[in-house]
């Protein structure tokens, strides 16, 4: 894992910065780090490297935005996400990430289209409160995060549908990902995805994750609410298209 070329180290460092930036400033950009890390390392090994970096960045996000979390929106999602993580764990031996990625991409694009329709400005459509809405997104986010660390676009659509402010968006998402990512650790360790070698690799990259997280905190203060929503949707769409191909 440490026998990398200069360019592979460069890409690994860029991925680490993007993970930190995504957690505190630009949600959605983090999923672009997933294929970059999978280019540097084998796909399955890369998921074990990325997960601790995500958790490390989650602590930065929770530390900064914890008071903005909208817990009623979060509590509705968590039980279903836990079920989704377990289903993803069971499916990891049967479905590979190459089979899963286009499915995730297609779902996210459909959800983006629905979200655009809901917010086209022609009428004030209500925030979804149906139990199955939270169940669907919780299951999707749980499965995708366990199998490919790719729940970012799914959560982005859910949180946008809840019409949260940018600080509430980051704060609610921060708590969600911290809790769910920590819940994933035993499953990933049991599958051998997290081990002593992968964690030593993480220790090299953690400072760059912190750099990205601190930059994201500064950046978010200067992004207007409307621009923030457009950026989230645009990045989610790019990530979804990347997953399709």
Image: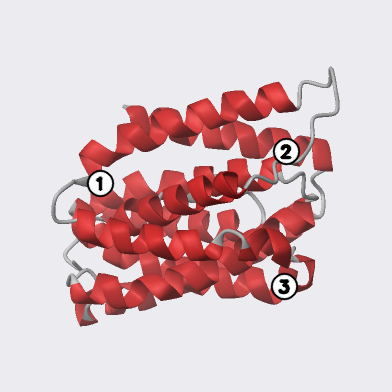
- Which residue is farthest front? 131
Q: Looking at the image, how many numbered discs can be counted on the residues?
A: 3
- Which residue is farthest top? 122
Residue drawn at point x = 84 percent, y = 17 percent = 122
Report the disc number at residue 66.
3
59 horizontally vs 6: left or right: right
Task: Tell me residue 208's x, y (percent).
Answer: 49, 66
How many other residues sit within 10 Å of disc 2, few (<14), some (14-19) or many (≥20)?
many
Q: Give the residue number, with chain letter if any, for mark 2.
A: 229
Report the disc number at residue 19.
none
N-term mark: 2 or 1: 1
- At numbered mark 3, what does the secondary structure look like: helix, strand or loop? helix
Quarter of the rendering occupied by the C terminus: top left
Quarter of the rendering occupied by the N terminus: bottom left
Residue drawn at point x = 30 percent, y = 56 percent = 88
Q: Give the residue number, with chain letter if any, for mark 1.
A: 39
Task: Tell me residue 168's x, y (percent).
Answer: 76, 58
How many other residues sit within 10 Å of disc 3, few (<14), some (14-19) or many (≥20)?
some
Which corner quadrant of the image does residue 217 belong to?
Answer: bottom right
Residue drawn at point x = 22 percent, y = 39 percent = 98
- At numbered mark 1, what does the secondary structure look like: helix, strand or loop? helix
236 horizontally vs 127: left or right: left
- Which residue is farthest bottom? 196
N-term mark: 1 or 3: 1
Task: Tell me residue 149's x, y (percent).
Answer: 38, 55
Q: Is residue 59 visible?
A: yes
Question: Spatial distance from mark 2 to mark 1, Cα to Cα?
Answer: 30 Å
N-term mark: 2 or 3: 3
Label 2–label 1 contact, CB within 8 A: no
Q: Is residue 194 visible?
A: no
62 horizontally vs 31: left or right: right
Question: Spatial distance from mark 2 to mark 3, Cα to Cα?
Answer: 20 Å
């Amino acid at each position: 894992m440490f026998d990398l070329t200069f360019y592979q180290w460069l890409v690994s460092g860029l991925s680490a910065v993007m993970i930190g930036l995504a957690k505190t400033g630009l949600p959605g950009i983090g999923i672009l780090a997933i294929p970059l890390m999978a280019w540097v390392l084998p796909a399955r090994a890369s998921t074990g490297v990325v997960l601790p970096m995500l958790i490390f960045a989650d602590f930065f996000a929770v530390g900064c935005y914890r008071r903005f979390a909208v817990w009623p929106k979060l509590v509705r999602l968590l039980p279903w996400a836990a079920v989704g993580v377990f289903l993803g764990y069971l499916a990891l031996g049967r479905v590979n990430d190459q089979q899963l990625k286009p499915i995730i991409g297609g779902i996210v694009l459909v959800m983006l289209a629905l979200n655009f329709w809901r917010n086209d400005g022609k009428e004030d459509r209500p925030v979804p409160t149906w139990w199955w809405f939270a169940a669907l997104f919780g299951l999707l986010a749980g499965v995708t995060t366990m199998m490919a660390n790719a729940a970012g676009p799914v959560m982005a659509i859910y949180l946008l549908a809840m019409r949260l402010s940018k600080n509430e968006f980051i704060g609610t998402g921060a708590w969600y990902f911290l809790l769910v990512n920590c819940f994933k650790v035993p499953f990933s360790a049991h599958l051998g995805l997290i081990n002593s070698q992968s964690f030593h690799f993480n220790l090299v990259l953690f400072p760059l994750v912190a750099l990205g997280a601190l930059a994201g905190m500064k950046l978010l203060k200067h992004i207007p609410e409307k621009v923030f929503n457009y950026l989230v949707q645009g990045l989610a769409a790019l990530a979804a298209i990347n997953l399709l191909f």
